[in-house]
Image (cartoon, rainbow, N blue to C red):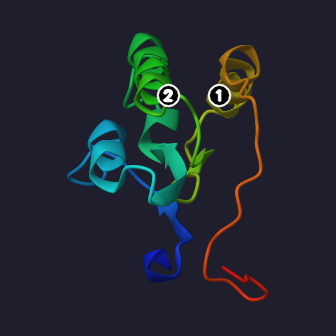
Amino acid sequence: MSVAVGCGLSSATTPKPMTSIDIADTRRLWGDRVTMGGGIRTVVLTDTFSEDEFEALLEDLFRAVVPGDRFILGFGDNLPTDASFGRVKRIAEFWAARGSFALGVQRCSGGQGDSG
């Protein structure tokens, strides 16, 4: 991460149960200083989780990242070989239905060519 130069990014952010922290706590910890990429724990793509649990996890994730700034939806890990492609498709559908965000451009400070 490059927080010291004003542009922090954590790629492959993976929440519980695959790590010890969830996305909501990570958002509170990092605030608006770090952009997170990831958020989908790949284990939820397997039959370890029921369809209801899977849907609840999507709802929880989207609630945790409101308003959506500094967040890039993705997988925090490689897809398991026993992943359900239907669930991957469902994530895309879920995002399409609920993932709109009024995008704005924000420059990182301290970068090359930055005069301030």
**Relative to 87, does residue 6 appear above or below in the rendering?**
below
Residue placed at 74% from the left, 89% from the top?
A: 112
10 or 92, which is in the foreground?
10
Numbered circle sitting on residue 44: none
Quadrant hosting residue 56: top left
Q: Earlier in the sequence, mark 2 or mark 1?
A: 2
113 or 42, which is in the foreground?
113
Q: Identify residue for label 1.
A: 91
Residue placed at 37% from the left, 49% from the top?
A: 31
Numbered circle sitting on residue 66: 2
Specify few, some or many for label 2: CA neighbours under 10 Å numbering under 14, 14-19, or 20 or more. some
Q: Residue 6, percent across and down?
A: 52, 73
Q: Residue 22, percent across and down?
A: 29, 42
2 vs 1, front mark: 2
- Tag 1: amino acid: Ile
**Relative to 105, does residue 43 appear above or below in the rendering?**
above
Q: Most extreme residue toward the top, as rendered?
A: 52
90 left or right of 83?
Answer: right
- Tag 2: amino acid: Val
Residue placed at 44% from the left, 60% from the top?
A: 33
Q: Most extreme residue toward the front, as rendered?
A: 116
Q: Whole-Å distance between the Cαs marked 2 and 1?
A: 17 Å
**Relative to 15, does residue 57 appear above or below in the rendering?**
above
**Secondary structure under badge 1?**
helix
Q: Residue 96, percent across and down?
A: 76, 21
Q: Most extreme residue toward the bottom, as rendered?
A: 112
